[in-house]
Image (cartoon, rainbow, N blue to C red):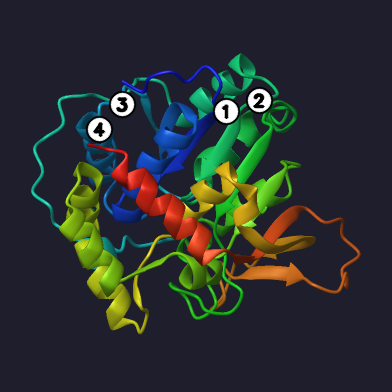
Amino acid sequence: MQGDTLNLRKVVFDSDTASDDAIAMILAHKKFDVVGVTIVAGNVRFENQVKNALFTLEYFGFDTPVYLGSRRPILGHWRTVEEVHGENGMGGWAYPEPTRKAEAEYAPDALIRLSKEYEGELEILAVSPLTNLALAYLKDENITKRIKKVWIMGGAFTQGNMGMSSEFNFWVDPEATHIVLHAGFDITLVPWEVAVEAATITDTEWHALLSRGKKADLFFVNACKVLHEYSKSKGMRGSVQPDSLTVAIAEERTLILEAKRVYVDVETCGLSRGAMLVDHYFLTKNQENVELVFRADEKKFKAMFFETLGDFS
């Protein structure tokens, strides 16, 4: 069970649950009152994402309802990335089948309902393609007035991890990204490179978690082992945890070292499909629509990350 959540902020965790998403889900349940987990097409096969979410919640004793959302982006084609997260999205970990089941309610409908139930206080931790939130907005545009805040992990300044300039979440469904960016939500956006700099778990830190050996430490090692090796094969220092960084920033704004309000859009076609477009110099004359994070505090993030994982006996 989640314990006393009376004084915690209400959030929905919107996820294409694979290795890094599962770790971020654990952190979210420690820092917030998670009133729902919504699943959207993204990292790996949809049925594996669902099982990964249900298993993670069951493993740690969280009874949060899980709602199934869109199994594909609004337009265009995308592909899953099992090479990044392992065949099942959890590093190939042969974990037991979860006994829990997902709810019957469609995730965009659940978002609309929960926004009414917790009007003015609900926040969205969107660490996935934005299809579910876009579909909810298209059905009920007043959702922007009821949701307090949207925290998005997505976009890249220049170093795309899917296209040459495209980050995966934006690349999967740039049309949904465009809809959400222009809907009128209060958005803070954490791009890919910010996580590479501040939220990469190095070999030394990996082995420290393995040696400490607490429940969440071993969960992390099992779930993220393919991600860890894949990241290093691409020249990174270790496994990048962008979703956990976004959750941490949502809980503790002092992790942000540099941010500013800017106008952000997304490219929806061609070789740069999914690329984040930032109007640094107010060239478009468009109103700023996001708070864009440029730098985050690596030391503070990792202290929070390791402490939170260590809280699970």
Residue 161 vertical position relative to residue 243 in the rendered view, above or below: below
Q: Which residue, given by chain and number where applicable, does mark 4 sit on?
A: 60
Q: Residue at x 35, y 20 (%)?
A: 104
Proximity of marks 2 and 3: CB atoms separated by less than 8 Å? no
Farthest-out residue, bottom: 235
Examine the rendering and report whether any part of residue 243 can be seen.
no
Q: Which residue, given by chain and number where applicable, does mark 3 sit on?
A: 62
Q: Residue at x 46, y 50 (%)?
A: 128
> What kind of residue is marked 3?
Phe
Please tell me in which quadrant of the rendered image residue 267 appears: bottom right
Q: Which residue, given by chain and number where applicable, does mark 1 sit on?
A: 9
Taking the image as shown, residue 128 lies to the left or right of residue 151, namely left
Element marked by disc 1: loop
Distance Cα–Cα, label 4 vs label 1: 20 Å
Residue 142 vertical position relative to residue 193 in the rendered view, above or below: above
Taking the image as shown, residue 102 lies to the left or right of residue 14, namely left
Q: Which residue, given by chain and number where applicable, does mark 2 sit on?
A: 121
> What kind of residue is marked 4?
Phe
Quarter placement of the N terminus: top left
Residue 55 vertical position relative to residue 197 in the rendered view, above or below: above
Q: Position of residue 186 (x, y in %)?
A: 72, 42
- Tag count: 4
In depth, the one of 162 and 195 nearer the eye is: 195
Q: Residue at x 34, y 48 (%)?
A: 23
Proximity of marks 1 and 2: CB atoms separated by less than 8 Å? yes
Distance Cα–Cα, label 1 vs label 3: 16 Å
Label 1 or label 2, whichever lies nearer to me, is 1
Q: Position of residue 91 (x, y in %)?
A: 19, 58
Distance Cα–Cα, label 2 vs label 3: 21 Å
Element marked by disc 2: loop
